[in-house]
């Protein structure tokens, strides 16, 4: 199965390369109209060509992107503006976004990240982390970056953002980087954000990182990275409120979606949880990580996560909770249903002994609260082990509920299908039979079991508008 996955991924990359090669050097007049769906439409538009952009894959366009955004920022209070990126390969370093702004990529547009590491600016660590994730100092700024913004749309006709991460992975593995690797897209301290209908390739590290932000829609995204690439998480909502992630396809070297809220004492002090998160219609391939991870950086708290219609293939675990002594914080009110899983090491995995501390100053008395973890309606095939559930001695993880889960085993399964310690909960209609710490219970037909919330979150009521603009560029 692994060989098949690798072959499929290689074919995807080869096809992407052929498509990109066909767009190189494409010139001529671009005319007509484009329609798309967005949280806001714009009154003004321009093309990267208007600012001297050259899409030949060689010319550096950093200044063109920066000039374009700077020019279009004048329309923030006049209906906003959109920047059109036509077909071509647009090599660039990092650039910032602005408010009331849309970045729109043509279907044959490829934004290529510069591989010249010395051209990347270094910024401070996130305050809720205290340190960079790769190194104790600062971090390289993300390719596409924005902070203190409102009403931002990054979308297109499935255009591509390619991080060209190989040089970063090599330097990271050789321990030659002084700072933490950049992400492809990071939005900080912002509100009303949409990221949709794009493909993200080969990020140096995490792909999409909304942090300290609210009212976020991530929709119709494809994320691809080699399954052995280090820390190429797909989507990492971090200390965010009201986030909707849907219709995404992710092949990754790390967790497909990792929910976070700060690291040890820094996250505890910052105190900004991730809450009211919807994840639906996710397809994930990640042989060494989880389809959805909660943590390990969860010190600001994670609450009210609703995941529905999750497909994971050749993935280490389905939903994994990662925490440990010194993390503090909480993970509670987690609801997962309708998971279809094939070829897994574990279906259920909760880790209370996760290490990886920011520094030696963490509080050993800061224990996490893990409670109200609900799973139901799960079908899994070719599984090595059903569950590995490890709480913390003196700090049991409580309120674990699993209902209607059928787990088919691999040809060489583990002898003991469930290992449980320092956990409490109940189960119903689960095969194979769970451990004694999760005893079967009678299902109340009236009240149900491990039920998904019936109310709707505010982000689910946000409807996209139909937008259009005329193109007339050379």
Image (tube, rainbow, N blue to C red):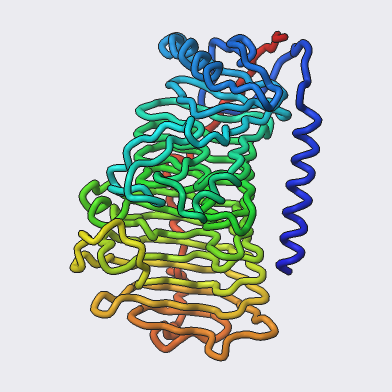
Viewer-proximal residue among 195 and 132 = 132
Q: Residue at x 51, y 59 (%)?
A: 292
Rendered view: 126 above or below 422:
above
Side (left or right) of 261 relative to 347: left
Label count reads 0
* Residue displayed at 67% across by 81% down: 410
Residue 247 visible somewhere in the drawing: no
Q: Is residue 240 visible?
A: yes
Q: x and y percent of residue 81 in the render?
A: 52, 15
Q: Is residue 84 above or below residue 158?
A: above
Lateral position of residue 410 relative to residue 119, left or right: right
- Which quadrant is the N terminus positioned in? bottom right
Which residue lies most toward the bottom here? 415
Residue at image location 24% in from the left, 46% down from the top? 270
Q: Quadrant of the C terminus?
A: top right
Which picture quadrant has residue 330? bottom left
Q: Give residue 375's position: percent from left, percent from top.
A: 49, 68
Residue 193 relative to residue 379: left or right: left
The location of residue 338, given as percent across then percent down, is: 58, 63
Residues 384 and 361: in front is 361
Residue drawn at the location 78% of the way across and 12% of the way down? 28
Give x and y (percent) for residue 388: 47, 78
Q: Taking 236 as reference, is 374 above or below it?
A: below
């Amino acid at each position: 199965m692994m060989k098949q996955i690798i072959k499929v991924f290689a074919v995807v990359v080869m096809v992407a390369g052929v498509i990109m090669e066909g767009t190189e050097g494409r010139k001529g007049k671009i005319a007509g109209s484009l329609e798309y769906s967005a949280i806001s439409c714009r009154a003004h538009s321009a093309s990267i060509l208007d600012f001297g952009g050259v899409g030949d894959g060689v010319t550096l366009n950093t200044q063109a992107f920066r000039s374009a955004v700077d020019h279009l920022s004048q329309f923030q209070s006049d209906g906003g503006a959109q920047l059109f990126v036509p077909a071509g390969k647009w090599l660039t370093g990092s650039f910032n976004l602005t408010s009331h702004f849309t970045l729109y990529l043509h279907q044959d547009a490829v934004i290529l990240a510069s591989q010249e590491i010395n051209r990347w600016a270094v910024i401070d660590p996130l305050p809720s982390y205290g340190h960079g994730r790769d190194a104790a100092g600062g971090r390289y700024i993300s390719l596409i970056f924005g902070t203190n913004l409102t009403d931002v749309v990054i979308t297109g006709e499935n255009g591509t953002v390619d991080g060209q991460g190989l040089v970063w992975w090599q330097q990271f593995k050789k321990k030659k980087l002084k700072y933490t690797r950049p992400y492809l897209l990071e939005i900080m301290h912002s509100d009303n954000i949409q990221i949709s209908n794009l493909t993200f390739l080969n990020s140096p590290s995490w792909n999409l990182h909304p942090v300290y932000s609210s009212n976020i829609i991530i929709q119709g995204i494809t994320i691809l990275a080699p399954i052995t690439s280090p820390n190429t998480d797909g989507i990492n909502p971090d200390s965010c409120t009201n986030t909707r992630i849907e219709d995404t396809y992710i092949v990754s070297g790390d967790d497909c979606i990792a929910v976070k809220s700060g690291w040890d004492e820094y996250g505890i002090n910052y105190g900004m949880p991730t809450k009211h998160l919807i994840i639906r219609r996710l397809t994930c391939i990640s042989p060494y990580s989880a389809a959805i991870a909660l943590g390990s950086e969860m010190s600001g708290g994670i609450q009210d996560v609703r995941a529905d219609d999750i497909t994971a293939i050749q993935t280490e675990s389905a939903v994994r909770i990662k925490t440990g002594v010194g993390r503090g914080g909480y993970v509670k009110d987690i609801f997962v249903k309708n998971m279809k899983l094939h070829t897994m090491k574990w279906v259920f995995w909760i880790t209370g002994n996760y290490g990886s501390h920011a520094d030696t100053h963490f509080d050993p008395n800061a224990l996490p609260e893990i409670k109200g973890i609900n799973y139901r309606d799960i079908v899994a095939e070719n599984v090595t082990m059903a569950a590995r559930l490890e709480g913390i001695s003196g700090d049991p993880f409580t309120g674990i509920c699993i209902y209607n889960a059928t787990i088919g085993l691999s040809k060489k399964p583990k002898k003991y299908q469930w290992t449980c310690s320092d956990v409490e909960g109940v189960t119903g209609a689960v095969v194979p039979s769970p451990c004694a710490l999760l005893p079967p219970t009678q299902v109340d037909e009236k009240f149900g079991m491990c039920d998904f919330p019936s109310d709707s979150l505010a982000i689910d009521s946000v409807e996209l508008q139909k937008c259009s603009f005329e193109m007339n560029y050379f």
